[in-house]
Image (tube, helix red, strand yellow):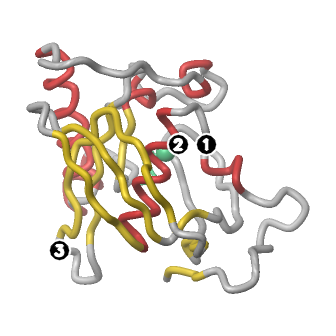
Amino acid sequence: MNDITRDGNPVLRKRAEKLSFPLDAKYIKVANEMMEYLKNSQDPKIAEKYHLRAGVGLAAPQIGLSIQMASVLVPGPENEIVFEETLVNPVIISQSVQVAALEEGEGCLSVDKDVPGYVPRHDRITIRYQTLDGEEKTIKLRDYPAIVCQHEIDHLKGTLFYDHINKKDPLDIEEGAILIG
Ligand SMILES: O=CN(O)CCNC(=O)c1cccc(Cl)c1Cl
Ligand code: NI
């Protein structure tokens, strides 16, 4: 995973291709490698040893593959895993009016510079996607897992997190927005 595509590479601004099932074996391998990267990046010893930037999600365009596939590995407050999944052809089928943003902003392996500011997103979403074995799932997510999935689904549409930050006042966010700490 050391060959992460960086902002400026057009693959990050393309709409990724929908995948058909059964998945080509090479994509199943890629999905496993992406999840492996996330697990390693969240293990302090391994991350330190291999100088890995921590990640809670990774989208295929970030490793140069313009396909609709992203892995998410979201830890909870005690570092237990609260959401682990590889999303194939994910679609947000409904979303709350309620806006939420991570208090500390967002980061991206494909964006080397820190871009401070709130990234306004939907606090709750319902996503429909397929798993690696082709099973279709429809799930509801809220708060941190919902934020991470929106960040990843954005990658599949060629959107980067800082596209959502208010350029004039990065810490401006609409009245009533939930800040997730
Ligand atoms: O697309 C995935 N990455 O770029 C991996 C590195 N960024 C993160 O793990 C990350 C960090 C903060 C907030 C969110 Cl929502 C995410 Cl996703
Ligand atoms: Ni990212």
- The CB of the residue at mark 1 lies under 8 Å from ligand 2: yes
Foreground label between 2 and 3: 2
Residue at 49% x, 83% y: name it.
181
User: Label 1, label 2: how many angstroms apart (C-alpha)?
Assistant: 7 Å
Name the image quarter holding the N terminus: top left
Residue at 22% x, 37% y: name it.
130
- 43 relative position to 140: left or right: left
- 88 relative position to 104: left or right: left
Q: For the residues labelled 2 and 3, say whether their Cβ atoms are less than 8 Å apart.
A: no
Q: In which quarter of the image is residue 80?
A: bottom left
Q: For the residues labelled 1 and 2, say whether their Cβ atoms are less than 8 Å apart.
A: yes
Q: Is residue 104 visible?
A: no
Give the mark, 1 or 2, whose residue is nearer the N terminus: 2
Amino acid type shown at disc 1: Leu
What secondary structure is marked by label 1?
loop
Q: Identify residue for label 2.
A: 154
Disc number placed over residue 80 in the picture, else none: 3
Expressed as whole percent of the image width and height from the top left, the position of residue 118 reads: 67, 68
Q: Can residue 134 be seen in this view?
A: yes
Residue at 51% x, 80% y: name it.
180
- The CB of the residue at mark 2 lies under 8 Å from ligand 2: yes
Q: Identify residue for label 1.
A: 160
